[in-house]
């Protein structure tokens, strides 16, 4: 299994980070797979897969490059650098472009676990990779980035609250399949048979949510490590299909009960309007009633104000047979 040995100070200083590049790379993985994990991803693929496949058809290097870079069990290092705090997509992808040709070919041999196909024995692989990633960003991610960012911020608020309640062990066990806290400063990051890595004191340990159901671990040298994981939120779950328990609806009203069920995951007013189809004024009035009753609370995440169920709200939803919190 993939094990990271982490001292307690490094874990205590670890933090969540939003990465446009990670979101783009996760979207590329979804396009490459061609099948979604839930109806929301299937709808996204129907909208974007034809143009992606047309791009591959127009560039004879792109398809073998993606297959090689996403390899059977390892992502080519040059193709997926670990984002830094405050770094935009263009800044991260510039590091893909800056990779040397020999380095790119060597990384692809590792990810393929064998020799390169003839189509990839060339010197412009970093430029080709940059062009492909930029296409995915511009065509499929950037137009919806603000909405995605709000969903990612909501996930970070929810995870941070879990850290405060149950410590990092509770959060790590729920981030992604195959990942768990083993105790004695050890994290299992995946189920692959890689040699253990000891993360040096003072290194950055970053946790990056993405909206597709994708995840991976990466690092840059010995100074920066990251775990990318699928987030909670309206792009990752079919929230609008969550049933509202009849008893809860009778008690607090159907509209307010619907909001309370949704708020197992922190969401903004804008997100609630989008998910429910209700007007802004209607959503605001129902939230005020729920706030005054102590069933939801407000939290700030960057520029957004998010709403989430309180312990009383959780108990009420659970007692009525509704969905537990995310």
Image: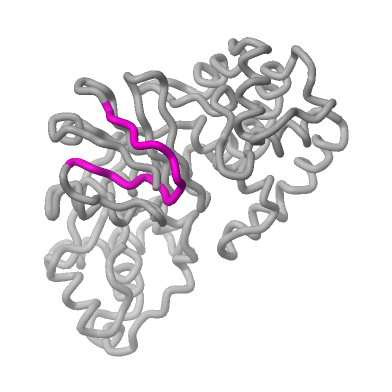
Describe residue 266's horizontal placement relative to residue 119 as left or right: left
Q: Is residue 123 left or right of residue 33?
A: right
Horizontally, is 249 left or right of 310 in the view? right
In the rendered view, tell whether residue 224 sits above or below residue 282: above
Give whichever of 277, 57 is nearer the camera: 57
Q: How is the image coloured?
A: one colour
Residue 40 lies, in percent from the top left, at 57, 60
Q: Please give the name of the residue rendered at 48% of the width and 56% of the height, measured from the top-left corner.
A: 236
Q: Quadrant location of residue 51?
A: top right
Q: Position of residue 288 (x, y in %)?
A: 21, 61
- Tell me the residue at 47%/41% (across/down): 216
Residue 264: x percent and y percent?
29, 64
Q: Quadrant of the C terminus?
A: bottom left
Tell whether position 197 is magenta.
yes
Residue 253 vertical position relative to residue 181 in the rendered view, above or below: below
Magenta stretch, residue numbers: 185-199
Residue at 26% across / 62% down in the picture? 287
């Amino acid at each position: 299994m993939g094990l990271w040995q982490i001292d307690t100070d490094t874990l205590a200083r670890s933090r969540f980070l939003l990465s446009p590049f990670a979101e783009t790379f996760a979207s590329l993985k979804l396009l490459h797979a061609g099948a979604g994990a839930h109806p929301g991803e299937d709808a996204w693929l129907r909208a974007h897969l034809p143009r992606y496949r047309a791009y591959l058809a127009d560039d004879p290097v792109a398809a073998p490059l993606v297959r090689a870079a996403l390899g059977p069990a390892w992502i080519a290092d040059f193709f997926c650098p670990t984002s830094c705090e405050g770094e935009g997509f263009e800044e991260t992808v510039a590091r893909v472009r800056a990779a040397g040709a020999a380095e790119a070919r060597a990384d692809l041999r590792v990810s393929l676990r064998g020799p390169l196909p003839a189509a990839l024995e060339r010197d412009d692989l970093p430029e080709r990779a940059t062009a492909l990633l930029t296409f995915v960003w511009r065509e499929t991610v950037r137009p919806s980035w603000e909405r995605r960012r709000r969903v990612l911020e909501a996930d970070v608020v929810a995870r941070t609250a879990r850290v405060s309640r149950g410590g990092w062990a509770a959060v790590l066990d729920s981030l992604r399949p195959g990942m768990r806290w083993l105790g004695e400063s050890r994290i299992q990051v995946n189920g692959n048979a890689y040699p253990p890595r000891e993360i040096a004191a003072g290194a950055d340990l970053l946790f990056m949510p993405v909206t597709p159901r994708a995840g991976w671990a990466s690092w840059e040298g010995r100074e920066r490590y990251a775990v990318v994981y699928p987030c909670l939120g309206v792009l990752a779950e079919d929230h609008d299909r969550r049933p509202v328990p009849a008893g809860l609806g009778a008690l607090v009203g159907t509209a307010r009960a619907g909001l309370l069920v949704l708020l197992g995951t922190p969401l903004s007013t804008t997100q609630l309007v989008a998910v429910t189809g209700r007007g802004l004024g209607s959503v605001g009035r129902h939230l005020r009633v729920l706030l005054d009753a102590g069933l939801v609370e407000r939290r700030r995440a960057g520029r957004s104000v998010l709403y989430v169920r309180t312990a009383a709200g959780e108990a009420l939803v659970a007692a009525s047979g509704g969905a537990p919190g995310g």
